[in-house]
Amino acid sequence: MAKEIAVSGVQPSGDIHIGNYLGAIKQFVELQDKYKTFFFIVDLHALTESPDPKKLREQIINLAALYLACGLDPKKTTLFIQSHVPAHVELGWILNTITPLGELQRMTQFKDKAEKHGVLAGLLNYPTLMAADILIYNPDVVPVGEDQVQHLELTRALARKFNSQYGNTFREPKALLRKDVARVMGLDDPTKKMSKSAGPNNYIALTDEPDVIRKKIKTAVTDSGSEIKYDPQNKAGISNLLSIYSAFSGESIASLEKKYAGKNYGIFKSDLAELLVQKLSHIHEKYKSLLKNKKSLMKILDVGAKSASKVAEKTMEEVRKKIGLI
Ligand code: ATP
Ligand code: MG
């Protein structure tokens, strides 16, 4: 039986953080053995946040290095840059033509980011390009964090609509969420998700130096009171730190609560910081060493784009025929 297909991407829009890792990249690594996988760097999406061109170029290559440092293996996975497979954009346009404007305007990410970046058409149309990124590979599953579930629902709706209008073409992919850490919260504001675009005190980057990690955990917002207890409603800060601790150590939240009963926030935070320093050091070292050979990173991405293009072109042939372009 053919392997099931998994597809996902990360924006090269800043420092990749532990939310991206736990919610998305860690799943990518776990999936590459069982699934046929397409993982990419969604550079065109990053444009919606008006990046500095020089920085963008660097962030693209950094993300490639980070994917590999986290354990993606180009022998197992098709790894590439979104803009190197232009068929994504073609399908994105086609999907735009069947997407009701109201569906895009009600997306949470659009509303949040429009506040920050202004109401740009690219920000509004982000989910149709994302739907194309996914549907073009006809995947079974899409490993993402919880914040992307709304976009994935739209992707499924667009697949249904296209199929009913033009005949069966796309599969409706399922979101694959980590149950425990599908939504890591911000360190400086634990009521909102951790985000690259929220500023460095909001997140722990996978490439933060040990002292930076220690400082960020030390200053992470915690709640009044002193008990180390999981209670996201009333103790959002400590609950978030407990989830992070549990995800990186493999210990259950209940056993962490027991371990820290009667102890203060300071001890708990300092242990968490050391855990993160230790767990991230391996990724960080590998990342630095991979970046020494940018040519070989680009080679991997070129090979990936060629093999992704073959699959994407096959889908586009069918799409063009179905809608009457050829
Ligand atoms: P930005 O603020 O620029 O949108 P981001 O941190 O949201 O950056 P993305 O590149 O948009 O990162 O998302 C990459 C992947 O990481 C997606 O699958 C997304 O769902 C997941 N992800 C992002 N933030 C979190 C989080 N706080 N917790 C869990 N998963 C997350
Ligand atoms: Mg995002």
Image (cartoon, rainbow, N blue to C red):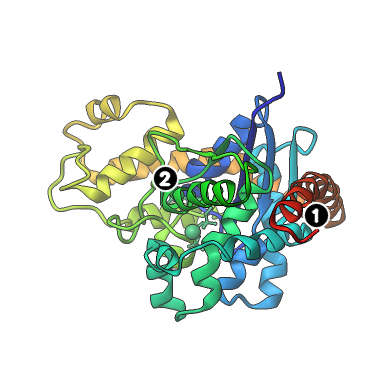
**Label 1: few (<14), some (14–19) or many (≥20) C-alpha neighbours in 10 Å:** few
Q: Could you say which is closer to the camera, residue 32 or residue 274?
A: 32
Q: Quadrant of the N terminus?
A: top right
Labelled pair 2, 1 in contact (Cβ < 8 Å): no
Q: Could you say which is closer to the camera, residue 176 or residue 54?
A: 176
Q: Position of residue 103 (x, y in %)?
A: 42, 62
Q: Could you tell me which secondary element the residue under label 2 belongs to?
A: helix
Q: Amino acid at mark 2?
A: Ala
Q: Position of residue 136 (x, y in %)?
A: 68, 48
Determine whether 132 is above or below 122 in the image.
above
Residue at 27% across / 56% down in the picture? 191
- Nearer to us of marks 2 and 1 is 1
Horizontally, residue 230 falls left or right of residue 187, namely left
Q: Position of residue 267 (x, y in %)?
A: 29, 41
Report the residue marked by disc 1.
292
Determine whether 84 is above or below 164 in the image.
below
Q: Amino acid at mark 1?
A: Lys
Determine whether 130 is above or below 3 in the image.
below
Q: Position of residue 183 (x, y in %)?
A: 38, 46
> Between marks 2 and 1, how big is the CA–CA gap?
28 Å
Report the residue marked by disc 2.
273
Q: Could you say which is closer to the camera, residue 26 or residue 179?
A: 179
Residue 15's tag is none
Q: Is mark 1 within 8 Å of ligand 1?
A: no
* N-terminal-most mark, 2 or 1: 2
Residue at 40% across / 39% down in the picture? 181
Residue at 30% across / 30% down in the picture? 253
Q: Could you tell me which secondary element the residue under label 1 belongs to?
A: loop
Q: Quadrant of the C terminus?
A: bottom right
